[in-house]
Amino acid sequence: MFFVKKKIAIDMDQVIADIEISFIELFKKEYNLSFDSVEDYLKENPNFDLVTTIKELYPLINTYAFFRNPPVMKDSQAVLRELAEDYDLYIATAAMDVPKTFTAKYEWLQEHFDFIDPQHFIFCGDKSIVHTDYLIDDSIRQLERFSGTGILFVNSLNETEDRYIRANNWKDIRDYFLSIKD
């Protein structure tokens, strides 16, 4: 009997690459700030507008340097290695949002996720073109466009969303896929 593996697409930014850490370091450097935690900073600055700040820093974010060295999300490598035994894995990143980062993202993926075939790297904008069984993403916009089963990787920008299967971390992802494994 021939067994066809189900396919999982995984977003890159804030799902396997901890872009938030890189953004915070850039923010602190550009505005000459020093704080220990984001929570403390937000308590002291309740009117802080993240969207405006991202727009202001976009020229510095849309760079090779910014996307080349973000930390790997905790447990993502180990869980994806394990899932690769039973699923075909794809990385689907909305690189069109930051088009100057293709090379950095590709190199980062090859360095940290060398067990995923580079032919399975999808650099796109609108993820409705991705036809996998599952999409793990932190973007509500992308999950709304996706036709398969969406899994929301929870972060501070989507924590109240409840229309999708929720994963707070990579152990939740592992548990979910183990629970549905045939």
Image: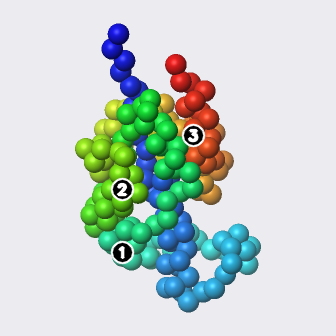
Asked if residue 142 shows in the view, the reply is no
Compared across the picture, whether 178 is left or right of 55 comes to: right
Residue 177, given in percent of the width and then of the height, sits at: 55, 31
The residue at 62%/43% (across/down) is: 171
The residue at 60%/27% (across/down) is: 179
Compared across the picture, whether 121 is left or right of 133 comes to: left
**Mark 3 or mark 2: whose residue is earlier in sequence:** 2
Disc 3 target residue: 173
Q: Which picture quadrant has residue 56?
A: bottom left
Query: Where is 143 relative to 158, above or below?
Result: above
Please name the amino acid that badge 3 sits on.
Ile
Give the number of the mark in front: 1 or 2: 2
Secondary structure at numbered mark 2: helix
The answer for how far apart the CA atoms under marks 3 and 2 are is 19 Å
**Mark 1 or mark 3: whose residue is earlier in sequence:** 1
- Along the line of sight, which residue is nearer the eye, 121 or 51? 121
The residue at 34%/32% (across/down) is: 131
Disc 2 target residue: 109
Disc 1 target residue: 65
